[in-house]
């Protein structure tokens, strides 16, 4: 390998991009904890079978204790319309403010879960059950199984396919919320046949 | 909470979106394993201090053994120009093909690592050292510390800031590669002062 001087180091930092930026829904009615939301960008898919996700939360966050106690949360995907609420739920604490009320969001039951609410205004949400919590440093890693996924009816086409492009999803790039735009390809397109490309509306 | 009939279940599945889609670089010269690339979308940031990432890889993948043996990999961010190579490195195996050669990519040393190569054509890459491997099911979860981040010189502005917009980054939404586009806000914009918004070129 030849050395390359085309790069400049910025040190050791969390520069992976884009990452998801999603509101987690939680609640603990037995302990009089109302539905709450916390936004995380340290989240990802970690396994296909069983379907599992990870979310990382600082111990000092209000939602950390709620999710640890109940073992449940929802992941609510972010549309451009929800971007401001998503930011708000990342910088404010549920100890001080009712985020659902403040952001005019509606808490609805999440199929497969007992107490954690979903956001009715989200384009889609995942119902998640915590399997393991691992202490890493500033953040604890919650490994969770996805027990159900629900998508707003309006995003289904007549044939039953899901039109993700219409969701106007938002991603996170180094501290900035960014719109998702053009489809550049589908998984496997680099080795797909001309026929398959044409069927999916792409050219070689 | 009121029941809501606006949603339709698609069952338990990995629907978190967008997620990163990145080429991991690895090599094991002691065992005559040449520089190789594997694309993963099951990746995320898991901790800020220390900076840590997770990547999930199926046991049967060629790179799984390489990264397990050497404890090292790079994460190479995906520009639109690299999208086809990123797809190719996700569907082909390094057992059958030299992906660097086939995709006309250049392997360069990664600062902070001994053997894992980075991709010279990537807009930025993270040097990562494996701390723990957790078996989850179809995938093993690799938890790794970021030991250095390098960014191509061309993305630094004169003031030393980084222009991520110019990287033309790519995200992954339910099986499709999608372009990252407009900046919708910065972290904290929902509660920022008028002055702060103006400084960052945004309006309330």
Image (cartoon, coloured by chain):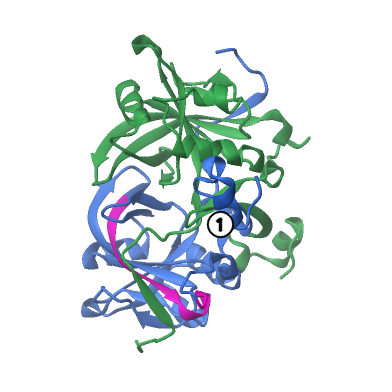
Chain colours: A blue, B green
Residue under the image location 38 percent in, 41 percent down? B54
Magenta span of residues: A141-158
Give residue A24's quadrant in the image: bottom left
Say if A155 sits above or below A42 in the image: below
Which corner quadrant holds the C terminus of chain B? bottom right
The percent coordinates of residue B89 (x first, y second) are 49, 35
Which corner quadrant holds the N terminus of chain B? bottom left
The percent coordinates of residue B62 (x first, y second) are 35, 28
Residue under the image location 37 percent in, 29 percent down? B63
Residue under the image location 47 percent in, 62 percent down? A22
Residue lying furthest bottom: B2
Say if B123 sits above or below B169 in the image: above
Q: Nearer the viewer, residue B178 or B68?
A: B178
Whether residue B148 is visible here, answered yes or no, is: yes
Crowding near pointer 1: few (<14 within 10 Å), some, many (20+)? many
Say if A200 sits above or below B85 in the image: below
Q: Nearer the viewer, residue A123 or A73?
A: A123
Residue lying furthest front: A195
Left or right of A86 on screen, residue B68 = left
The percent coordinates of residue B30 (x first, y second) are 36, 10
The percent coordinates of residue A5 (x first, y second) are 66, 18
Disc 1 is placed on an element classified as strand
Q: Main secondary structure of the magenta part?
A: strand
Q: Tell me, yes or no, whether the highlighted magenta stretch contains residue A9.
A: no
Pinpoint the chain carrying mark 1.
A
Whether residue A185 is visible here, answered yes or no, is: no
Q: Tell me, yes or no, whether the highlighted magenta stretch contains residue A150.
A: yes
Question: Mark 1 — residue?
Answer: A171
């Amino acid at each position: 390998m030849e050395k390359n001087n085309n790069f400049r180091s910025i040190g050791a930092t969390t520069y992976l991009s884009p990452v998801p930026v999603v509101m987690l829904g939680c609640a603990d009615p037995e302990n009089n904890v109302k539905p709450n939301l916390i936004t995380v960008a340290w989240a990802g898919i970690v396994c296909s079978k069983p379907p599992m996700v990870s979310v990382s939360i600082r111990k000092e966050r209000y939602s950390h204790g709620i999710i640890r106690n109940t073992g449940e949360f929802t992941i609510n995907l972010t549309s451009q319309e929800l971007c401001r609420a998503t930011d708000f739920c990342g910088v404010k604490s549920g100890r001080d403010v009712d985020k659902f009320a403040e952001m005019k969001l509606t808490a609805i039951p999440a199929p497969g879960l007992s107490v954690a609410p979903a956001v009715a205004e989200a384009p889609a949400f995942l119902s998640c059950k915590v399997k393991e919590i691992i202490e890493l440093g500033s953040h604890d890693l919650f490994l969770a199984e996805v027990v159900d996924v629900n998508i707003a009816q309006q995003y289904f086409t007549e044939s039953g396919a899901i039109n993700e492009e219409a969701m106007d999803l938002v991603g996170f790039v180094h501290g900035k919320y960014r719109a998702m735009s053009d489809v550049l390809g589908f998984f496997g397109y680099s080795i797909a046949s001309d026929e398959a490309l044409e069927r999916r509306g792409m050219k070689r």
